Image (cartoon, rainbow, N blue to C red):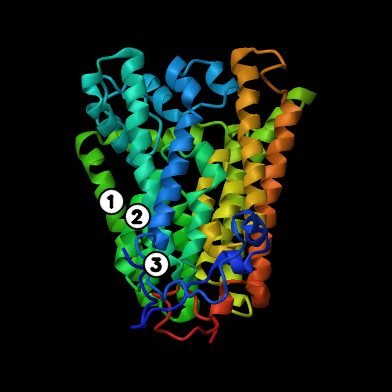
Amino acid sequence: MQETPPSGSSTPQPLIVPSRSDPLLSAMTEPVGGPLGRRTAPGVVKPGFFTVERVLVLVTAAAALLAVVLKGHCRTSGWATPDQYSTVCYSVFPNAFLDGQLEKLVPFFSQGSPFDGPVLAGWVAGAAAWLTSAAGGGPVRQLAFFDVNAALIALLWILTVVVAARTAGRRSWDAAIIAASPVLILTAYVSWDFWAVAPVALALYFFARGRAVASGAALGVAAMAAPYPVVILLALLFLGIRAGALTKMLELLAAALVSWLLVLAPVMLFNPPAFADHVKQMMAAEPTESSIYGGYNLVAQRLGLDEMHVGTVNALSAVLLVVLVLGIMALAFYAPHPPRVGQLLFVAVAGYVVLSKDTEPWHAMWLVPLAALALPKWRPVLLWQAAVVAHFIALMLFRSKGLGNLGNQHAIDMPYFLLAAMISMLATCALAAMVVRDIYAPEHDVVARGGQDPQGGVLDPAPARAPHA
C-alpha cells in the first residue's frame, strides 16, 4: 500500500518526518541512530515493503496486544469486584454482558432489556453475544464476549490509524500518536467508545477529500455511539459558513441526520419505547465522579453540604454547553485566520469532555485522533496523556475502595482521586489552550507551515471570508 499523494498533485510529495522536527522525538531516536538523515526523501523514494501505513499498522497491532495483556488478571480470574478495579483491568463489556442479560435479551430489541449503552453499542453488543452463543454460559462466555469486542476494537483502532495517516496529508507519521497512545493502550477495551472514534476518523477523511455527504453519513453513525459528534457537526457548520460553503454544510448535516435515522429505524420499528427509555435514563443519570458536577457532590458529601440534584446538574451542564458552542462559533468566525478543521474540532470536543456530566477518563480516546491532527507535538500530547492515565488509575482505585471496601493498600481516598481528576481536566484545558494559541499565532502551528489545511477539502473550493462579509 503506497502513500496517497496530496489532493491535486500527480507527483509524490516528500513526507514530513517528526524525528527531524520534533525535539522530543529527535532525542528519543538517538539510541537507534538519531533522526532520519537530511538526504533521505520519504514519500518520494519507494520504501519497499515497510511503507508508512504498514509500519503504523504493525505499531498499532503491538499496542492492541499490549492492551489485552493489561487485562490479563481479569481475563484469567474474571471481572469480579473489587479485583477488576484494584488491578485496573475493568471493562464495560463483561459487566454489561451480565447486567444487560445479554445471554437472553437483545439490547433495544427485547422488551425489558436493561442495557444502558448507546444504540450503536447495543447493536454491537447484541451481535457479539450472538457470536459467542456457542461458548456456553457463565465465565467462559463472558470472557468470549470480551475477546470478540476487543478484537473488533483492535480492527477499528487499525482503521483509525490508517485513515488518520491519510487525512494528515504529508504528515502521515503523526498518526503514530494514535498507534502508540498510552491512553488507548489503557482504555481502548474499557467501553464501546471506539465505535464513535473510528467513524469520526472516517468522516474527517471524507471531509478532507471534499466528500461532504459521506462525511456527514459517518458522523451520523458515530452520533449513535457517543454524543460528541454533534459538537463536531456544529464546529464544521461554523467553518463552512465562514468559508462560504453553506450548501455543502447543509448536505453534510442532512446526510448525518439520514444515517442517524437509519441506525435508529430498526429499533423504532421493533421496540419503539426503547430509545425514549434510553434518553430518559440519560437525563436521570447521576453525574459521574470524574465530572465537575460529580466532583462537587463528592466534596459536598464529605463536608456535609447540599449536593446538586440531577435536575440542577442537567440545567447547569446545558447552559455551560451552550456557552461552549457560542465560544466555538466565535472562534470559527472571528479568529484572524480561519482555524484548521482539526484545531477547531479538538477545542470543541475537549470543551465537551470537560463540561459534560457523563465524562469518564476513557473519553479521552475521543481526543487522541483529533490531537494528532490539531497539535502533533509529542511532548505536550504525552504529558496530557500521562495525566489522563493517572486519572483513570485513580478512578479505578477510588472505586475499589467505595465498591469493594478495600483498605488503603489497594485503594485511594476521595481527595487523591479528585486531585488526579482535576490535574487531568487542567491538562485537557491546557492542550486546548495551546491549540487556540496556534489558531491566533499560526507561526506556532507545525501543520500550518505546510500551507493549506490538510483536512479542509470541503471548504477549499470557496475562498474563506468573514461571516459578516
- Report which quarter residue 54 is drawn in: bottom left
State the residue in front, 126 or 69: 69
Q: Position of residue 44 (x, y in %)?
A: 41, 76
Residue at image coords 36%, 22%: 143
Left or right: 410 as drawn, with respect to 177: right
Q: Earlier in the sequence, mark 2 or mark 1?
A: 2
Left or right: 385 as drawn, with respect to 174: right
Q: Determine which residue is flagged by label 3.
A: 47
Q: Which amino acid, by three-letter code, is at mark 2?
A: Gly
Residue at image coords 61%, 19%: 400
Residue at image coords 70%, 13%: 407
Q: Position of residue 391 (x, y in %)?
A: 65, 37
Q: Determine which residue is flagged by label 1.
A: 261
Where is 380 relative to 364, above or below?
Answer: below
Numbered disc 1: secondary structure: helix
Q: Which amino acid, by three-letter code, is at mark 1?
A: Leu
Residue placed furthest toward the right: 303
Q: Which amino acid, by three-letter code, is at mark 3?
A: Pro
Q: CA distance from mark 2 to mark 1?
A: 8 Å
Q: Position of residue 252 (x, y in %)?
A: 35, 66
**Visible residue check, residue 330:** no
Q: Give yes or no for contact between labels 2 and 1 (Cβ–Cβ under 8 Å).
A: yes
Left or right: 220 as drawn, with respect to 280: left
Left or right: 425 as drawn, with respect to 210: right
Q: CA distance from mark 2 to mark 3?
A: 37 Å
Q: Earlier in the sequence, mark 2 or mark 3?
A: 3
Q: Determine which residue is flagged by label 2.
A: 220
User: How many residues crowd around disc 3 within 10 Å: few (fewer than 14), some, or many (20 or more)?
Assistant: few
Q: Which mark is in front, 1 or 3?
A: 3
